[in-house]
Image: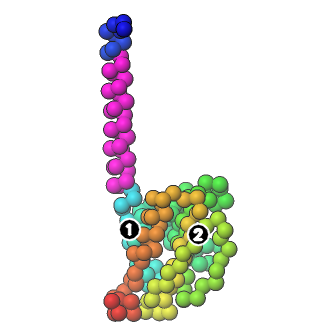
Amino acid sequence: MTNAPVHLLILARAAALAGYAAVKVRALIGAARRRNGADSVRTVEVEGVRLNVPVQWGDVERDGLGRLVIHNRPSRFRVDGDAVWYSSAVELRILPGRFVPARNAEAMTVTRRFIPTCGEGVTLELALANGMGAAQRAAAEAVLATAAPAHEGSPATKAA
């Protein structure tokens, strides 16, 4: 075994230290991003329903058929029809009444939930792109799971 020159040993230790520091900084940035992003929600009240949506999601808007919808990104950042859309799109439709005809959404998995309100009630239709990651899917499903009537006088809050 030969002795390595001192400058190579110092360089190797510096490289190892730089790699360790890079891993720690990446972990800190990731934790800060998760803390400031995914956990931050805003409350939206629409059609008698209170929704807790992530702050990054868009506002309530109308789709091509005039129905209310909230997307997981604001319209200025959305490119409909883009290939990326099929792996990251979330659509939460707010539909009046209980009966909602099934829609053709092969690229998406659709889940519905009925929320009784003071009126006829509202059906929430959550459509998730089939290629979506687990973290995005969990955040979108949490929005649907935590939806509640917006007013204390609604049938759902009286029964609880």
Q: Name the amino acid type tagged 2.
A: Thr
Task: Please tell me which residue is depicted at 44% across the width and 64% down the height of the picture.
Answer: 139
Counting the numbered discs, the total is 2
Q: Secondary structure at mark 1?
A: strand
Query: What predominant SS class does the magenta segment belong to?
Result: helix
> Residue 135: horizontal and vertical position, in percent?
45, 59
Name the element at disc 2: strand
Is residue 153 visible to us here? no
Q: Is residue 110 among what the camera can see?
A: yes
- Towards the viewer: 54 or 5: 5
Classify mark 1: residues with Cα within 10 Å, few (<14), some (14-19) or many (20+).
Answer: few
User: Which residues make up the magenta segment?
Assistant: 11-36
- Magenta highlight on residue 41: no
Look at 38% across and 47% down and name the residue there: 30
Q: Label 1 belongs to which residue?
A: 42
Q: Which residue extends farthest front?
A: 1
Label 1, label 2: how far apart the Cα atoms are: 24 Å
Mark 2 sits on what residue?
Answer: 109
